[in-house]
Image: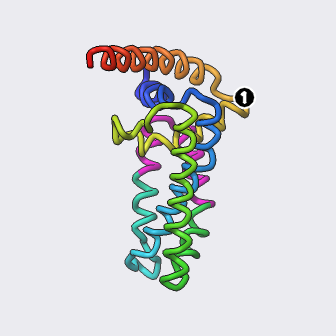
Amino acid sequence: MTKLEQLLSQYAAYHLDHKNVLTHFIGIPMIVFSIMCLTARAGFLVSGFEITLALILLFLSVIYYFSLDKALGLLMLVIYAIAYPFAYKIAQLGMGAWLTISIGTFVVGWVFQFVGHFYEKKKPAFVDDLVGLAIGPLFVLAEAVFLLGFRKDLQAKMLEEARQQRRAMDEKSLHTVHAK
């Protein structure tokens, strides 16, 4: 199993309910965009070009995603390249408007996440493993790619392993409840 399959399977084990996945299609992009907005305000100039904290974080995440899968990493780069100018524009607003939009988007995104996990009846993946925070955006992108009919082999491997992990999680929870 590749590292990508392992990470996506681990994340998917917490996201097998279609309603939960749907809420993640809304919530995760909102959260990522809000973090872009919040971090696009801090920066420094290099030869007349502003390097923001957002650009650094996006660059590092794309390198990570690219190390896991070149095609998904490239798609994420394209998505970030489209979204960043909008985030940068919001970061240039007055303090009140910038914070209201950025924090408001962040909070609404998390509301979608937690509503989804209500349907799933499972805690978010990052509660058990902080890597889930980095894998969430890649999971949503992979799910979109699957919906478009691509990478069906990856989807099949991910779902098979995720279902096995989920069964193990459920059995562990059941044993913990009975042990009390």
Question: Quick one: quadrant of the C terminus?
Answer: top left
Q: Which residue is mark 1?
A: 149
The front one of 171 and 147 is 171
Residue 27 falls left or right of residue 175: right
Magenta residues, dominant SS class: helix
* Above or below, comparing residue 62 to residue 124 in the picture: below
Q: Quadrant of the N terminus?
A: top left
Q: Position of residue 6 (x, y in %)?
A: 42, 25
Residue 76 counted in the magenta span: yes
**Figure quadrant of residue 18:** top right
**Tag count:** 1
In the rendering, at what x and y percent does residue 61 appear?
43, 50
Residue 73 part of the magenta segment: yes
Residue at horizontal 51 percent and vertical 55 percent from the top: 32
Viewer-closest of 15 and 51: 15
Q: Amino acid at mark 1?
A: Gly
Residue depicted at x 36% and y 20%: 173
The residue stretch that appears in magenta? 61-82
Residue pushed farthest bottom? 94
Looking at the picture, how far across and down is residue 129, in whole percent? Answer: 34, 36
Residue extending furthest toward the right: 148
- Which quadrant of the structure image shows residue 46? bottom left
